[in-house]
Image: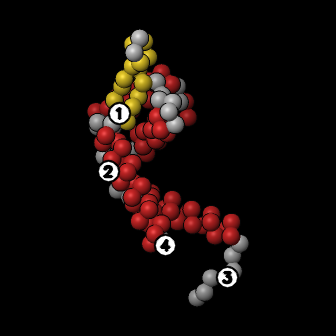
Amino acid sequence: MSNPVQAPLAVAYIRFLQLARAVQSLPDGPGLDANESALLEAIVIHWHEGQPMTVREAISLSTLGSPATLHKRITRLRGKDLLTTTSQEGDRRAKYLVPTGRALTYFGDLGRSLQSVAASGA
């Protein structure tokens, strides 16, 4: 059965949906649940953009949970060696969340898997 002629934007969006489905089916690597993954992603995006998130900022992400719940998730991510904290010189009050080498390896593995799926035309 052949595909009917499709609008380029429709094809692009369908391709995006295929890639998203492929990423969702990937093994979770360090054993993250969906909530831990969402929090880690938010923290890593801020870090990648050159604006590391403080613990205080992370526990105020109300869309991801209550402050107490988010604090527990940060503790679990630190326990899984995916996050560490650091402070700026001269101000030890603010603790910044920084991805560890293990976290960066995890995201690198996801990126390679996504690239492989994209190349295969899933």
Residue lying at 39% horizontally and 60% vertically, measured from the top left: 113
Q: Position of residue 53 (x, y in %)?
A: 48, 28
Q: Residues within 10 Å of mark 2 (few under 14, many from 20)?
A: few
Which is more N-terminal, label 3 or label 2?
3
Q: Which mark is residue 4?
A: 3
- Sequence order check, earlier mark of 2 and 4: 2
Image marks 1 and 3: residues in contact by CB distance under 8 Å: no
Using the numbered discs, state the Cα–Cα distance from disc 2 to disc 1 in whole angstroms: 15 Å
Tell me the kind of residue under disc 4.
Gly
The picture quadrant where one finds residue 32 is top left
Label drawn at residue 121: 4
Counting from the top left corner in percent of width and height, residue 92 is at 39, 13
Mark 1 or 3, nearer chain start: 3
| Disc 3, SS | loop
Give the mark, 1 or 4, whose residue is nearer the N terminus.
1
Name the amino acid, label 3.
Pro
| Outermost residue to the front | 89
Residue on which disc 1 sits: 83
Mark pair 4, 3: CA separation? 18 Å
Q: Secondary structure at mark 2?
A: loop
Residue drawn 41% across the image and 28% down it: 97
Q: Which mark is residue 29?
A: 2
